[in-house]
Every structure is written in C-alpha cells, then in structure tokens.
Image (spheres, helix red, strand yellow):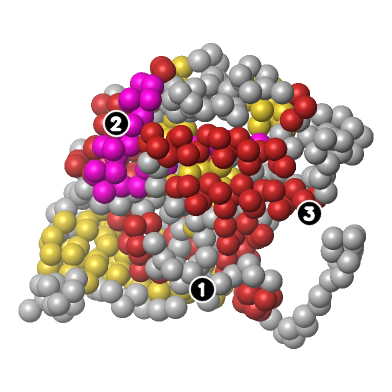
Amino acid sequence: MRSLSLELGADAPACELVPLGRGDYADVARAYRAVAERRGLRAPRAVDARTLGAPVLRLEGEVHADGSSVLHTFDDVLACARHWREDLALERARVLVGGWNRGGYDGGHPDVLPANAACGGDAGLARCARGVRALGYLFGLHDNYQDLYEDAPSWDPELVALDEQGAPRAGGVWGGGQSWMICTTQALAFAQRNLPRVVALAQPDFLFLDTTLTTRLQPCTHAAHPMTAAGDRAARLALFDFARAQAGGLGLEGVREWAVPHADFLEGVMTHRTVHGESFTAVPLFPIVYGDQVDLLTVQADRLRPDRADAVLDHLVYGELPMVEFGAGRYWEAEPELDEALARTPAATFARGDHGWARGLAPTDRLLKNVYELLGGTHRAIAGRAMDAHRFLDAAGLVEQSVFGDVRVTANYGDAPWRVGDTVLGRYGFLVESPRFTAFHALERGGVAYPTGACFALQTLDAGRGVRVFHAFGDARVRVGEAVAVVEREQVVVDR
C-alpha cells in the first residue's frame, strides 16, 4: 500500500473528494470530466477540420549541438513540404519550423528577428511560409519566452526570476549556452514586441511555445517584479492567449490541465506512453479527460522512427498523431535503406512497403505515408470525440482496446495471435473499426489469410462512390463488402 498526503496552501485551501464506488481508472477519468467542466477546464470545442488527420511535421533550421550547423534552410523546408504533398500525396499537415530565429534553435532569445541568415533570412522565411500554405498545409513557428541568453541584444539580468532564496533561476544549458529563466511577468512584453512583426513577415497559422509548461509554477522574489505561484500561472496564460490570438493556433511544450483551454496541442503527454519501462503500465487518464479537447503529442526528442512499431500502436490506441524524425536537408535523396537485419524484425513493421503504395521509397517516407493513412484516417474518424473506454483484453496486458464513440481500436503488442471477429492480429497487429473507416494490420481478415501480415485502410466515400482502399504492404488481396479485390497501391472499389 501507499499512503497519500495533500499539502494545502493559501492558493488551494481545500480539496474535494468524490466517491465513485467500484470501478477502474477509466471510471475515475470519466467522472473527473464533470469536475473539469465545473472548473472551466473543459468546454464544447469546435474542431478545426484543417487539423484532422494532419500530423505535426517538424523541421529544424540552425542548431548548435556539436557546433553550429544548418539542418534545413527555408528552401529545404519548402522542398520537403512539396515532396510530402506531390510525391507522397499527404493532403494535410502542420509544418512546424524550429531554429528559424536569428540565434538558431535554443539561442538568442528573447530576440527572434531578423530571421536566421544562414537559413535564408527574412525573404527566405516569407517565401517558405507562402509556399507551404499554397500546398494546403498549415505553417507554424517555434518560439520561446521563458529562456533568456546572455548574448541576446535584449539581455538584462534584472529580467531573470529570483527563487525563494533570492538567487537567479538558471534554465538549461542548451545550444545557445546557459539559459536563464525570465520572470513570466516580463515575458509577455517581449511577445507583444516580437509576434506582430513575425506575423506580418510569415503569417503563421500557429505558434509553438517551448518550455512554458515544463517547469512548475514558481514564485519570483525580485523586488521589481515579485510574483506568487498563482501569479506565474496568470502570466503564462496571458502569454498563451496573446500568442494564440496572433496566429490563430497554439502548441505548448509540457502538460498542465489548466493550459488545456488555451492550446490546440500539447507536446509531451504521449511520451509518458511511448517511452516507458517494463516495470509499469501506462493508462490513459489524461487522454480520457482531455483527449477530445486538445491534440496530444510526444516531446520532440521522442519522434517516430522506422524501428518503432510499438509507438505506432501507442498512438493508434490513444487516437493521436505522431511526429516523425527527419534527416537533414532533402532527407529522402540520400537516406540509406534499412539495415537488412532490422528490416526483417517486427519493430520495423510500419516501414514496410512491399507490394504496397510506398514500395521503392526510402524508409522514412514509407513510414510517413503509412502512418499518415492509418493514423490520420483514425484521427479523422474520431474527429475530436472523447475516449469513452479503455481496457486490457489479456491477462498479460499486451492486447489493448479503446473506444471513441463509434470508433473501436484494438492493438496487439504480443507475439501470440489475437482474434477480433473475423480478424487475427499478430505481433504489432491492429484493427480500427468505425462506420466509414476501417484499417488493419493482420494475419487474417474477412476470410483472407496473410501469413506474413498485410496492412490496409478503407474509407467509405460519399454518395455511393465506393470505398477508397489504401494498401500499405503485404498481400494485395482485401475483402471489400462481399467481394475480394486486388489493390496494388490505392484504388476506389465499388461494391456491386
């Protein structure tokens, strides 16, 4: 047993206990939705159709790890976006650029303009932004209003927050060197100075604010700008609301429930799911309470790679979209094939393209196209609905199932086959069932056997126009209605 205690203070002098009776974690999370609504943390929310099925595809400009280098110029970013749209047929994406600012990634803050000269300067950034939006994608920029760097023109040690002992609060040591944490009462002024100019230059559809939720609420004891922990939260929320009003959309690093009504996506909570040890089990408390309110991402250091089939299933079970790891420049032109030994392992399942749409492509592009169709289609089918239920179907906890309204997702992480109706799931097999969208990676489906596994996504089109079938990999036979069709890459099948 473990004992729990609550420390109450002036800002939170009471706690509320709600007895629920017999139940499990899903019952707790569902019951807590009502508490969150009373507190204004949940509310009816319109879904931005442009973000449904649209992964955050993140590229970095200038970085300083192991010396300064440019991973992607602004022309490279636009070339990548064109490649995704024209060669991979990704219709929706949120393209997020980091390291675009004058000092590069994690450098030079709070001063961001002019845009990074090594990446192409102001003219290059504006041209990139226009081109990305012309492809039908959303364009976003990474920014930071917590870290201060001593080489910034606006550096002033009097802006740094002081801790309870009166010492300056040090941030991390990043690419730009030692950072110092600005008192959040002072941060909004820099955003008010910078962001209107950034918007005028690049017209981003959304902004991403780094680090602003990763630290606890902290007081500042500086005589010129004292602040309580509650004042820290109020200052952060004012910053979020200003940034969101400037661009229209906002992503934040970190996860705090009080920030949910102020953001469109939160980066970090999915890493609690995708990076976990063998000794514990992740359950979706936060996703059940807030998954329909805000998109949930991993931290950027936990981007999806071709050898992470388990992480693909993690995102499917929670109905979320992954960030994919990209190489430098026009990555697909020089990317090597997967190591043959790795390519034959289950871990590389979703980088397969044999007999499917993405055959012949580099591993990252095979992974990107497959997860775009499989996870993107699931994300659109869920369309902002809450996770209603989650459970482990086997005693070992290796088969999971989640329900979002009329969408049901079943995933098998284990070696033993698992049957769901007429579908048999092998290692890293899954089945997404909904009235208009179905996807699976299976050993058998609808009476068709797939000894080495096959993967498809089927979308019912409007007005009796048939079913769009996407074939990711494996045997090309697939049951559509009463018939078995052969789909090599992609095809609209009309069931007669």
Q: Residue at x 80, y 50 (%)?
A: 229
Q: Is the residue 233 above or below the residue 421 in the image?
A: above
Q: Secondary structure at mark 2?
A: helix
- Disc nearer the start of the sequence (1/3): 1
**Residue 173 percent location from the top left of the image:** 68, 25
Distance from disc 1 to disc 3, alpha carbons, whole Å, reads 26 Å
Which is nearer the eye, 492 or 216? 216
The residue indicated by pointer 2 is: 127
Which quadrant of the structure image shows residue 343?
A: top left
Precedes in sequence: disc 2 or disc 1:
1
- Is residue 342 located in the magenta-colored stretch of the structure? no
Residue bearing the label numbered 1 = 44
Left-right relation of 72 to 398 = left
Q: Amino acid at mark 3?
A: Ala
Instruction: Name the residue beneath numbered marker 3.
Output: 230
Give yes or no for contact between labels 1 and 3 (Cβ–Cβ under 8 Å).
no
